[in-house]
Amino acid sequence: MSDTGSQPAHQAGRSLDPHLGRYAARTAGMTASEIRALFAVASRPEVVSLAGGMPYLSALPLESLAADVGQLMASEGLTALQYGSAQGTVELREQICEVMALEGITAHPDDVVVTVGSQMGLDMVTRVFCDPGDVVLAEAPSYVGALGTFSAYQAQVVHVEMDDAGLVPEALRQALAAVTASGRRVKFLYTIPNFQNPAGVTLSVQRRAEILEICAQHDVLVVEDNPYGLLGFDGQTYPALRSADPTNVVYLGSFSKTFAPGLRVGWVLAPHAVREKLVLAAESATLCPPAFTQAVVSRYLSQHDWKGQIKTYREAYRERRDATLAAMEQQLPAGCTWTKPEGGFYVWLTVPEGLDTKAMLPRAVTQRVAYVPGTAFYADSFGSRQMRLSYCYPTPERIREGVRRLAAVLEGELEL
Ligand code: PMP
């Protein structure tokens, strides 16, 4: 019975949640992501959404994939529909090692744990390493989904400055010193070195070694999140942090951007002892990752030209990036600055002083364009003059129209 008399509990819940006193303390850190709230609006057909990071799946050969799935059912259905190992199938873990070799990683399939997307990897790593109040260092800005996970485990995020060459080593030293001086413990550095989400920048090769050295010196683990590394527009790849330091880096990978996110197949590569803990964490969360989608990915990797598919994606995204940057150059008002991504999905835009990207979002949506306000990518209140624009999904024509609408919104704001 609800405390509002005869009102049904589900209606009473809208104003006062009758379960409020029951929730675990950690739920205080579980808040709805700004992106989720945007999804409903941004997916209306009249809105040009530069908000979500949805891959351009129309580039996939759906008919031949459908045939593959049919054959998979006929030949391996009984294993593909059965429970499997908590760590993932051996076949897929071996294939994952071949994928990682493209970025200089030498790894043993035993040290790979297959996850339900790399988001689950983030959850497992945070669960295994973070107690409430522990500090996680992350780039400023950082991936909204990771910030949500850190907050759900009551870890505190301390942002570290980033510039066009990625995380700034000196800022990392200062952050480590400041956190240690405040008596708190840094559990890991969370970094997205390639085509970063949301900033679109890439960590320079020189800085990679320096950052690894600083973290090793301070006994701080590195969590390297790399879903975009194979999406460099010139086919360029950068050496993974993990390739230079197999003992102090936990690496997160995903097939979401190189194949398809709906399959929810990602992985963690971890030093052996950490891998043991991650398997236990995975087991308690899901028993085992889906055998079916693992089999689909394995078959895709063994029978399709997956490298050719990645090239197709890269070309589509390069065309969209070019359309975005050209339209921004032509249309955005003076005082706007933005990053120049060499791969991945995102541009990070800074608008003129005095404007607030979160406050102006409802007006942008009225003018049928959506983006994600910069504040979503900070655990503190920074980012009010920034926004993330994703060019991965709309066609170049839609992008040009979206940037034109955005420019009109910004002009309107400047006149207010
Ligand atoms: N990390 C980063 C940096 C991402 O951008 C994303 C997806 N947007 C993820 C992790 C989660 O990806 P997945 O679909 O593999 O869970």
Image (cartoon, rainbow, N blue to C red):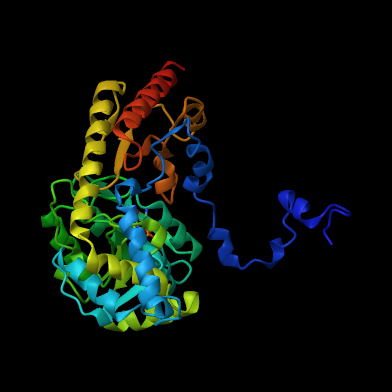
At x 48%, y 34%, the residue is 45
At x 49%, y 74%, the residue is 285
At x 27%, y 33%, the residue is 324
Q: Nearer the viewer, residue 83 or 270?
A: 83
Q: Nearer the viewer, residue 129 or 406?
A: 406
Q: Is residue 351 among what the camera can see?
A: no
Q: Position of residue 232 (x, y in %)?
A: 18, 50
Which quarter of the frame holds ligand 1? Answer: bottom left
Quarter of the image that includes the N terminus: bottom right
What is the residue that sits farthest to the left in this orientation?
206
Residue 394 lies left or right of residue 316; in this view the side is right
Q: Position of residue 93 (x, y in %)?
A: 27, 76
As drawn, 260 above or below 389:
below
Occupied quadrant, residue 51: top left
Q: Position of residue 213 (x, y in %)?
A: 17, 66
Q: Nearer the viewer, residue 80 or 397?
A: 80
As drawn, 175 above or below 402:
below
Q: Nearer the viewer, residue 313 or 139?
A: 313
